[in-house]
């Protein structure tokens, strides 16, 4: 079995550990792709058989490329359905979208050729990577031609659990299979107990979603500035400086190619904005009366920019929601903790102009807001899951991983929002048994372990957690072989979890 792992940003501290485990316990051949030259030369990258450097390729290809030829090449890829709409991918990329038009075309064409060459020569069976930038989205698109499995890690909504999804807009396939099967029968006493226990812990405030881990990296806390977190960010400056000097704009996977002082200046600006918005623009308490709750989403972020690319203008969405509300309700909007100080003050002022919208501070407890709301409306994100667990009507404007749940109100067309929102407020009836079946399916269909950034959460790199991640990858790519033994730990895997994907086999002739 031949794997290719994309090591970018925080994952150059995680992927090599997983690769070593897969090679040692399963005999897998594991290579890496990295976005930056300094990253490719890190000592831990020696765990991989080969390391492919996109920045080095771009530095060689882009300056020597012909614009008209690149444009024809990209047009042919789109017309042949090799890739989805490239403009959509580019607008979802926080770096490349800032380039001038000509540079965008030259860069994207070189990225496409990088992946075509890599897949043609290396023929990996499986690619483990996110789809949070245009380069990864292109990799996912082109991987289909070679029938390469693409596993996208998704931390999801459950503590100490994660899943893999198979495409940018796809959901939890194994969870859906389990849920659909469970709808036609009663859960066992044990299964009901497991689901009830999670529900009770959640409502008691004892669960935190791993998808909120990026909040822990911010130098800002709800109480002010964290010296420890600020120090951790400063410690990343040397690698960023080296990447900036070596690769510059050719590093298109993270902000490591940007001037390192730019991040520090942004942090300083965020602190000023945070203090100003908290003191002048945010309310500290939801007003009286009935309301619908909408949480501002993190942006830029995979969950909104890639999964819901036509729902990225949140100010426009808030205005549309405000217009769709019955006159009896207001809309309560709360900022996201991870975005403290990131948005402009004018952004918030535009929201405050709407007469039936109230803007709240990120410091408020979202659980209390959900409990007191008559309905929750969200694009994607954890709030929808939390609304379901509190048995509130939830309207989803984007593709949720659990969009198959019967009690969700999906709204793919904004013109239908007034009708759907009215229906959710008037006709919603909780169904405890259906909810328990969803919770049980989410637990049973996900993998044990924590996927994330070891720099922010050192426990992620613990051998026990790495073993769980390795087992999850094996489970996903080969449902027929027995689970390998990862040291002294026992990791039982149910048949339903092992059913996700058929192995592709070795694609070498």
Image (cartoon, helix red, strand yellow):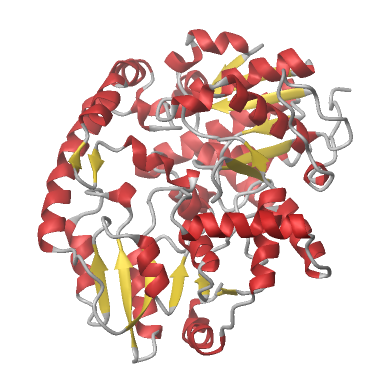
State the residue at coordinates (29%, 38%): 218
Q: Where is residue 355, by image quadrant?
A: bottom left
Percent of width and height locating residue 286: 26, 73
State the residue at coordinates (43%, 29%): 457
Task: Judge left or right: residue 138 versus residue 329.
Answer: right
Q: Quadrant of the N terminus?
A: top right
On the question of residue 493 being in view, the answer is yes
Percent of width and height locating residue 232: 29, 24
- Residue 375 position (above or below residue 118): below
State the residue at coordinates (33%, 47%): 338
In this view, the residue in front, 79 or 333, is: 333
Task: Judge left or right: residue 439 versus residue 336.
Answer: right
Percent of width and height locating residue 467: 66, 24
In this view, the residue in front, 296 or 74, is: 296
In this view, the residue in front, 104 or 388, is: 388
Q: Quadrant of the C terminus?
A: top right
- Residue 381 position (above or below residue 113): below
- Residue 16 position (above or below residue 391): above
Percent of width and height locating residue 149: 74, 37
Q: Where is residue 104, by image quadrant?
A: top left
- Residue 412 position (above or below residue 78): below
State the residue at coordinates (59%, 18%): 17
């Amino acid at each position: 079995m031949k794997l290719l792992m994309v090591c970018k940003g925080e994952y150059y501290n995680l992927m090599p550990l997983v690769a070593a485990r897969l090679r040692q316990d399963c005999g897998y051949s594991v290579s890496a792709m990295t976005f930056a030259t300094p990253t490719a030369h890190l000592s831990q990258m020696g765990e991989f058989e080969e390391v492919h450097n996109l920045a080095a390729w771009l530095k060689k290809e882009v300056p020597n490329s012909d614009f008209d030829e690149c444009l024809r090449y990209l047009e042919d890829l789109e017309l042949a359905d090799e890739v989805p709409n490239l403009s959509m991918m580019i607008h979802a990329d926080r770096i490349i979208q800032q380039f001038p038009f000509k540079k965008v075309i030259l860069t994207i064409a070189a990225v496409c050729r990088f992946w075509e060459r890599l897949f043609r020569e290396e023929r990996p069976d499986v690619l483990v990577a996110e789809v949070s930038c245009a380069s990864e989205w292109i990799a996912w698109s082109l991987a289909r031609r070679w029938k390469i499995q693409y596993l996208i890690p998704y931390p999801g909504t459950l503590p100490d659990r994660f899943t893999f999804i198979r495409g940018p807009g796809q959901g939890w396939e194994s969870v859906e299979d389990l849920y659909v099967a469970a709808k036609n029968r009663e859960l066992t006493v044990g299964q009901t107990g497991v689901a009830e226990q999670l529900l009770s812990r959640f409502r008691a405030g004892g669960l935190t979603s791993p998808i909120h881990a990026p909040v822990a990296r911010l130098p800002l806390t709800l109480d002010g500035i964290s010296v420890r977190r600020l120090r951790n960010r400063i410690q990343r400056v040397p690698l960023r400086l080296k990447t900036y000097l070596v690769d510059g704009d050719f590093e298109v996977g993270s902000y490591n190619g940007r001037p390192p002082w730019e991040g520090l200046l942004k942090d300083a600006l965020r602190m000023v904005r945070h203090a100003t918005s908290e003191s002048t623009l945010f309310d500290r308490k939801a007003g009286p009366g009935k309301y619908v709750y909408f949480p501002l989403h993190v942006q830029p972020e995979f969950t909104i920019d890639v999964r819901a690319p036509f729902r990225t203008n949140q100010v426009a969405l808030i205005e549309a929601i405000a217009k769709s509300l019955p006159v009896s309700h207001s809309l309560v909007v709360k900022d996201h903790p991870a975005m403290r100080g990131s948005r402009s003050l004018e952004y918030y002022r535009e929201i405050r102009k709407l007469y039936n919208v109230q803007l709240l501070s990120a410091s408020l407890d979202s659980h209390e807001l959900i409990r007191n709301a008559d309905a929750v409306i969200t694009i994607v994100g954890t709030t929808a899951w939390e609304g379901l667990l509190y048995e509130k009507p939830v309207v989803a404007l984007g593709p949720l991983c659990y969009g198959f749940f019967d009690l969700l109100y999906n709204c793919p067309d904004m013109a239908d929002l007034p009708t759907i929102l009215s229906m959710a407020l008037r006709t919603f009836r909780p169904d405890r048994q259906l909810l328990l079946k969803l919770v049980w399916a989410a637990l049973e269909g996900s993998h044990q372990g924590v996927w994330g950034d070891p720099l922010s959460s050192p426990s992620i790199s613990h051998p026990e957690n790495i073993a769980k991640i390795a087992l999850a990858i094996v489970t996903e790519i080969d449902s027929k072989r027995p689970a390998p033994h990862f040291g002294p730990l026992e990791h039982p895997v149910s048949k339903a979890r092992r059913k996700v994907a058929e192995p592709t086999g070795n694609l070498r002739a």
